[in-house]
Amino acid sequence: MREPASLDTEVLVAGGGPCGLMLANELGRRGIRCLLVDPKPGTAFNPQANATQARTMEHFRRLGFAHEVRALGLPPDHPTDIVYMTRFSAHELARIRLPTAAEAVEKVRAMTGSWSAAELPHRVSQKFVEQVLLRHARACASADIRYGWALESFEASDDAVTATVRPAASVGEAVRVRASYLVGADGARSMVRRALAIEWGGATGASREFMGGKMFAMYLRAPGFFSVLRHPKAWMYVAVNAQRRAFMASVDGISEFACHAALHPHESADDWGEAEARRLFAEVVGAEVPVEILSTGTWIAGHSLVAKRFQTGRVFIAGDAAHLFTPTGGLGYNTAVEDAVNLAWKLAAVLHGQAGPGLLGSYEAERKPLAERNTAYARRFADSVGLFRATPELEEDSERGALGRQRASEHLNEHARLEFNIPGVTFGGRYDASPVIVKDGSAAPSDQPNEYVPTASPGGRPPHAWLDDGRSLYDLFGRDWTLLVLGKGAPTTAPFESAARHLGLALQRVNLESETLEALYEAPLVLIRPDQIVAWRGSAADDALAVLGQVTGRH
């Protein structure tokens, strides 16, 4: 029997969703040979996640394609509001107004405080984001992207991972892969996680009137929808009535929508198709609208699960393989992207001989607490909207109905701001317990979903600022390590530059004499990691070698 063909790579990535594609981009740009396999024929057809948070957009900006992502999805002048209605052709109950894509580009430069950022959020379906990520990953010479290929099996030893990958259609020979590391970014039913016997922690099976239990998903085309809409357009429409709860996101701002309806306990929907989709769509719209059903499916809301381990030796898990969310706040996809950002530079540093093995151990130490934090926020948002009881009188044209709608309006307006104005969730994630963060004894601000207090306390996102010449401070950061030198009387940086040469690190020095920035960062010297996290700050460079040793996992 002929031996299968063989292939050597440095990182094998299972899964071609946003997490896997982001890994390929980050690794490929650092010259790391990576092979990505996914049994699907290509990127997603269904819209799936629909909200790219501001921190994710900042990472896309760092890689040079945030503007491409922002040009996709809704037309630039299309509202991105979230509106709550009894039915989509009936009473409006609550609304949160948010900037259009065009307004976001202009407004971000004048925003301060909690929303001081290089980028604002963007409402765009995941299917479009994946196309951008794929195009840029394929532009990396060291990235081999193979849709239509599946990870069949793997074994890990102390010095390598050996795996078998095979064309998913079974028309073709298996390939034996030898890699230094394997990352399972292969989704909620992750083969990699199951092979490692990693159990879930957290909670599942939450029962709510909405966002708890089985949901029926419809991807549809309804160009006549706006003709029955009695209120201004939005990006997301949420139906709140006693018959059928649902949410629906506009995919293209013209005719395509992703609609997700809550099922009742007696409805299985396992064999439902177009007829049932048309019926449910008519229920949540409250009017008959011609509709073309593009796809249907079911999924379970109510998950708040985090894997008990993110690493076993040379094998890692990330994205939905490591954490499952109820999709309130859009946190699942965005958390997955940051998993990839965190892990990729660490893998590259170790493979390039620029870091010790302890750096890879910091991936779980940093990302697992963040996943637990973010799933808890998503659960809180789901409780806020899903435990609100929609009673029949909400739709009555009566005094009782008006009073019910007033109460619903008060609750839902408060909820909308809780779930959709979340700079604290977006920017406030921290790695305070990380072994590769050099602590300075400063206390981090309290973690609140709707408020973010910029701080350069090591372990968090660097405070953002727009410079006098119109550039974002983040645009000055290097691809690898950055040493900010702030103020007019900054101390010498020679020890850092010498230590970086000794350790083989690429260190970019950024001199800014701004006293405002020095006050914002509360130190004249600040070390920024490749994933744009503050690793250290101080007033002198005397301990530079020890600092760089710790932040790269050497001790």
Image (cartoon, rainbow, N blue to C red):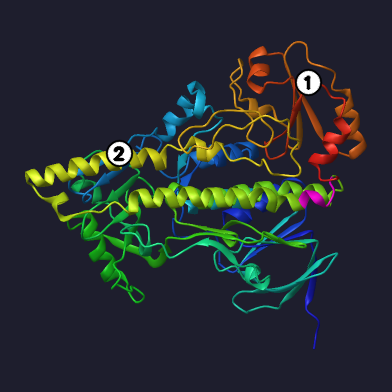
Residue designated by label 2: 413
In the rendered structure, the answer to whether residue 250 lies left or right of residue 499 reads left
Secondary-structure class at tag 1: loop
Q: Residue at x 75, y 10 (%)?
A: 488
Q: Residue at x 21, y 49 (%)?
A: 86
38 in relation to 52, above or below: below
Q: Pinpoint residue 514: horizontal percent, then vertical percent.
A: 67, 13
Q: Amino acid at mark 2?
A: Asn
Does the magenta segment cover residue 413? no
Q: Pinpoint residue 89: horizontal percent, then vertical percent.
A: 19, 49
Q: Amino acid at mark 1?
A: Ser
Q: Residue at x 51, y 36 (%)?
A: 424
Residue reaching furthest left?
A: 398
Q: Quadrant of the C terminus?
A: top right
Q: Are marks 2 and 1 in contact (CB under 8 Å)?
A: no
What is the magenta range? 355-360
Q: Pinpoint residue 198: horizontal percent, then vertical percent.
A: 64, 67
Residue designated by label 1: 539
